[in-house]
Image (tube, rainbow, N blue to C red):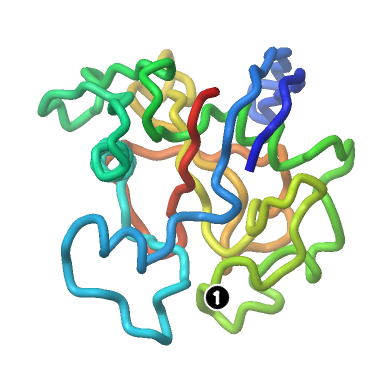
Amino acid sequence: MGIPAGRILLHDEGTRRSWNVEVEGFRLGAYPVTRELYEGVLGGEAAGAARARVPVSEVSWLEAVRFCNLVSREARLSPCYSMGDDRDGLDVVCDPGAGGYRLPSEAEWEYACRAGSPGVRYGELDEIAWHRGNSGGRAHDVATRAPNAWGLYDMIGNVWEWCWDVYDPGVYGPYRVFRGGGWGDLPRACRASCRRKSHPTFHIDDLGFRLARSV
């Protein structure tokens, strides 16, 4: 989906710090990467029909970055990332102008999630998200809840989504940001502004990612 240029005010509740970010126009996947796409690009066993459209999870930040490069090459686009073998991911360099797929920045992510809405989230929680109160303790197929005003599904709930940014290098070193809340989370975590973080090798069953491209 095409996302117009604009500005977003980010806020960190832990430090009570706020900062403005100018966001250039970009493109963002209408929903998170599915198991079907992820396993298809990696050449592994195809997801069963019952789980093909569920967001892929158990994917680390480093694995998500590698996937972005793989799917870029599949699409005959120049990869955005260059990387070595540092398990902290500190040697990963991103060139957004290369034209390939990448992870969104957290400013891009929150700006796209809000889609112009100033509220805690872009709609009523049960209507837009799979969360602890309605998920039955599992992920659900993408695009089965209501989208936001820009046609993006599952920005809140279902699975958390990795972003490009380092969270707070002075305190947490190489930890990267993820956003959006997941199928097992309470409403407080399922907000447009909620920020979480972990090591680039971390993976868990309610954390995935979505693809972005610069324009």
Judging depth in this view, the residue of 207 and 143 nearest the camera is 143
Say left or right for 76 vs 171. Answer: left
Q: Position of residue 131 (x, y in %)?
A: 65, 68
Q: Position of residue 153 (x, y in %)?
A: 66, 57
Question: Which residue: 22% across, 21% down?
Answer: 82
Which amino acid type is shown beneath numbered disc 1?
His
Q: Position of residue 45 (x, y in %)?
A: 18, 73
Outermost residue toward the front? 76
Question: Which residue: 54% across, 74% down?
Answer: 141
Say left or right for 56 vs 71. Answer: right
SS at mark 1? loop
Say left or right for 181 vs 145. Answer: left
Q: Height in image: 200 above or below 40? A: above
Q: Residues within 10 Å of mark 1 (few under 14, many from 20)?
A: many
Q: Position of residue 145 (x, y in %)?
A: 71, 69
Per the image, the residue denoted by label 1 is 140
Instruction: Tell me the quadrant of the picture where the C terminus can be found.
Output: top right
Question: Which residue: 65% across, 51% down?
Answer: 155
Q: Height in image: 11 above or below 119? A: above
Residue 109 location, quadrant: top right
